[in-house]
Image (spheres, rainbow, N blue to C red):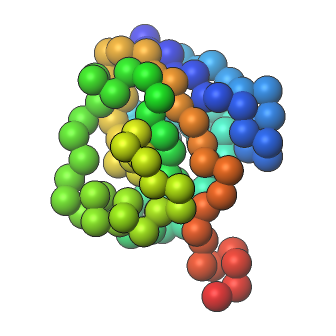
């Protein structure tokens, strides 16, 4: 089992969270199955950036981003070198520390 440590997020998980998952699951699916309500406006189809996260530790064991993900990440709020889309990031065998950004760009929920 691999641990995913979610750092505290004011709205989604104020106390932070530590979950154990089997390698091979995406970060988004792991979070949702464990009550961490990460936004995923495109239903995890790699068509938006609402599930954007930062991989603060453990990135050496996750899958490499594909071109579609990299193109979308350019549009994410608060992009940094640790940025990934959680719906596309597959957990490996190394524990991860994940930070959920303070803001997200969600044109549907923001009524644009």
Can residue 22 be seen from the camera position used here?
no
Look at 50% across and 45% down and name the residue there.
Answer: 53
Q: Quadrant of residue 110?
A: bottom right
Where does the N terminus fall, quadrant-wise? Answer: top left
Position in image of residue 25 (x %, y %): 38, 33
Residue 12 position (above or below residue 70): above
Query: Looking at the image, which residue sits at the far bottom?
Result: 112
Where does the C terminus fall, quadrant-wise? Answer: bottom right
Position in image of residue 5 (x %, y %): 57, 22
Residue 41 position (above or below residue 31): below
Look at 28% across and 58% down and name the residue there.
Answer: 70
Q: Nearer the viewer, residue 19 or 55?
A: 55
80 relative position to 99: left or right: left
Q: Nearer the viewer, residue 97 or 22?
A: 97
Look at 53% across and 62% down and name the residue there.
Answer: 77
Query: Number of labelled discs?
Result: 0
Position in image of residue 71 (x %, y %): 28, 65
Position in image of residue 14 (x %, y %): 80, 34
80 relative position to 20: left or right: left
Residue 87 position (above or below residue 3): below
Query: Looking at the image, which residue sits at the far top?
Result: 1
Can residue 83 be seen from the camera position used here?
yes
Look at 61% across and 28% down and name the residue there.
Answer: 6
């Amino acid at each position: 089992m691999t641990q995913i440590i979610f750092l505290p997020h004011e709205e989604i998980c104020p106390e932070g969270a530590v979950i154990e998952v089997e390698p091979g699951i995406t970060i988004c699916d792991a979070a949702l199955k464990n009550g961490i309500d990460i936004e995923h406006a495109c239903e995890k189809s790699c068509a938006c950036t609402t599930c954007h996260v930062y991989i603060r530790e453990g990135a050496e064991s996750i899958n490499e981003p594909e071109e579609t993900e990299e193109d979308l990440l350019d549009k994410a709020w608060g992009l940094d070198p640790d940025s990934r889309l959680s719906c596309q990031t597959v957990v490996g065998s190394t524990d991860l520390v994940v930070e959920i950004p303070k803001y997200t760009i969600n044109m549907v929920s923001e009524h644009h």
